Image (cartoon, rainbow, N blue to C red):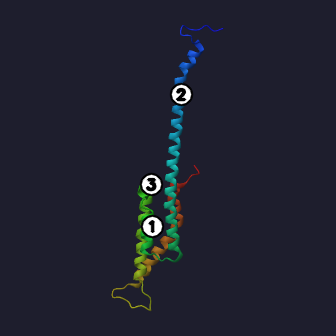
Amino acid sequence: MHSLTPAGVSPVLQILQGLLTPVIGVTTLYIAWQQWKTNERRAVLDRYERRLRIYQHVVEFLRVIVRDFKVEIPGILKLSAETAEADFLFGEDIPNYLDEIYTRGVKLHAARAEYRDFRQSIPEGYDHRKVVDAITNEEKWFLGQLAIAKEKFKKYLDISR
């Protein structure tokens, strides 16, 4: 039989009572750490989804361009609006690439608007070769961009690691 201490509590019970506070503390700390890790994973997933959405908008825009090479200003402005947060989600390389897509889209649009064929009146100073070269140059650039965009975005979207 256990002897009781003067307070009437056995030594084993006193030890268990003394351990209760540290166990509760450690348990609380573990739960807080798990919540922090869950929030961190949620933030990573949210950032990934936002990056993926921007990539999808870029690919959609490029596919529309290479379908018939008709670039419309509303389409360029739409892409600009859809990818506006890229400055905050990626390194400098992606916003710079998006700027190049916008610029080249505007150049292609302008060259196509300037283009005249044999049925149209030719404005003074019109240089057909220059306009055709500009159109050809931009069309060639856009043709290669689906693969290039995939490669540029890959380091931000690759989850195989």
* Residue name at image x 51 percent, y 60 percent: 53
Q: Is residue 127 above or below residue 76?
A: below
Tell me the kind of residue under disc 1: Leu
Mark 3 lies on a secondary structure that is helix
Tell me the kind of residue under disc 2: Ile
Can you identify the residue that label 3 sits on? 89
Give residue 110's position: percent from left, percent from top. Answer: 40, 77
Give residue 147's position: percent from left, percent from top. Answer: 54, 64
Q: Choose between 3 and 59: the one closer to the eye.
A: 3
Neighbor class of circle 3 (other Cα within 10 Å; few <14, some 14-19, many 20+) is: some
Q: Which mark is residue 24?
A: 2
Q: Residue furthest front?
A: 8
Figure quadrant of the N terminus: top right
Q: Report how far apart the C-alphas of labels 1 and 3 lie in the structure.
A: 16 Å
Q: Give the mark toward the camera: 3 or 2.
A: 2
Q: Report how far apart the C-alphas of labels 3 and 2 lie in the structure.
A: 40 Å
- Answer with mark 3 or mark 2, whichever residue precedes in sequence: 2
Give residue 99's position: percent from left, percent from top. Answer: 41, 65
Tell me the kind of residue under disc 3: Leu
Can you identify the residue that label 1 sits on? 79
* Residue name at image x 56 percent, y 10 percent: 8
Q: Which mark is residue 129?
A: none
Whether residues under marks 1 and 3 lie with C-beta atoms below 8 angstroms apart, the answer is no
